[in-house]
Amino acid sequence: MVRARGLAVLIVATFVAFACGGSTGTTGSKGEIDIASDLPVSGADASSGLPTQQGAQFAVTRAATVRGYTLKFVPFDDAVNGAHDAQKGVQNVQAMLANSKVLGMVGPFNSGVAKAEIPVANQAPLAMISPSNTNECLTQSLDYCQAANGFTPTSLRPSGKNNYFRVAAPDTFQGPAMADFAIKAGPLPAGLGITKVAVWDDEETFGQGVAKNFAKEFTAKGGTVVDTKSYDPKAKKDFKDFLASAKDKGAQGIYVGATSATGGCIARGQMAGIFNPDIYYFGPDGIGDAQCLKDSGSMATDKMFATQGVSDATQNPDAKTIVDAYSAAYPGSSNLGAYTFAGYDCAALIIDAIGRAIDANGGSMPTRQQVIDALAKTSSFKGLTGVITFDANGDPTHPTLQLQQVKGGAWTFVAQFSQGG
């Protein structure tokens, strides 16, 4: 698949909200079907993972049944010592597989966890649908995937069949979107008009991928990457040497390929006393959360920008009924994250696929493979975050992402971008 090259600001949202959301069956007398989730819901990742889990749970609770089967939500936490952990994710998937009632899972949240989980779920098989994974090599057979990440879509799927889907835009879109925004001059949301940046990543699958794609696009558009650095977040949380070097080389901004759990915004906080508060700091969805702002301290200013891999459902008028219902069920700003309604859509997509699989199976309980087959045929599904059709790789055919800026101590919507030709 070729990297997305055209970006267009969506002036008016045209998405139609997922209209079901209510009961898809009249009773639950035929038995129980479980929908699981695997997300980081404790520690530094909780400010992103927990609202996403709650979105998925709300979709399952709201549906209640499907074709006469009772729906049950079964959540798992893949965080260990406060951060997402791939092996914990694998253990969670194995627990799901041991429960024959689980016919699909929402998650994982992080691409590095997906890399470990996909082969396990693939052999079962079990349908996986992530609200937030963005590493392109999870689905796209690009020539650099093996060398850069140590895997390809084929190597992650020992059965030779696909069981993995996502609703988020891949890094081939997210990284370049921020690069284009950084280098293009003009009033917001046109761009920042800067030409020199420094880039660092956390050595994880997600962080390295998005940083590489940002740097590639920024350079292609005439900008200069004055310094680059990779850090193992488990070994180092002091970024001052890199920051001092970036300043000496004239960096007007820092791009970070990391998450809050891997210290993505600890570096922002350490910029105090090295850079003035006007220095730009931008990154992917991994830093677009409350933990980032906490870690940034006095440097949590309006010079911080983050992309998010899905559109903002609160900007979609047709999603208002469900958005308001969720907010009533989970009040407070801490319960609303960038991927809350992507989590909702993922669960709703599984429910829809299960319903179609039951129909194709003459009303009987479908197999896990039948659910995967139905999910793969998803076309023009009207979700809260967009109209979703999956391509042969399990990617959305028309991904949309959003740009956020820190304003008044919170991440705030600026604009949405859609893939062009």
Image: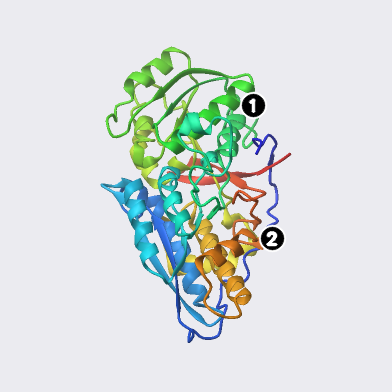
Residue 403's image quarter? top right
Residue at the spot 42% in from the left edge and 12% down from the top edge: 248
Is 210 situated above or below 317? above
Is 386 situated above or below 410? below
Assign the N terminus to one quadrant of the image: top right
Residue at the spot 50% in from the left edge and 66% down from the top edge: 368
Is 330 situated above or below 147? below
Residue type at mark 1 is Ala
Residue type at mark 2 is Ser
**Mark 2, residues whose alpha carbon is within 10 Å: few (<14), some, or many (≥20)?**
few
Residue at the spot 59% in from the left edge and 33% down from the top edge: 176
**Percent position of residue 213, x then y:** 55, 30
Q: Distance from label 1 to label 2 (Cα)?
A: 36 Å
Question: Along the line of sight, which residue is nearer the eye, 108 or 401?
Answer: 108
Considering every residue shown, the one lying at the far top of the view is 248
**Mark 1, residues whose alpha carbon is within 10 Å: few (<14), some, or many (≥20)?**
some
**Percent position of residue 193, x then y:** 60, 25
Q: Are marks 1 and 2 in contact (CB under 8 Å)?
A: no
**Percent position of residue 197, x then y:** 51, 22
Instruction: Say which element carries label 2.
Output: loop
Query: Which residue is label 1 attached to?
Result: 185
Assign the C terminus to one quadrant of the image: top right
Question: Along the line of sight, which residue is nearer the eye, 199 or 89?
Answer: 89
Q: Between tags 1 and 2, which lies in front? A: 2
Question: Along the line of sight, which residue is nearer the eye, 395 or 219?
Answer: 395
Query: Which residue is label 2 attached to?
Result: 380
Instruction: Say which element carries label 1.
Output: loop
**Percent position of residue 162, x then y:** 55, 53
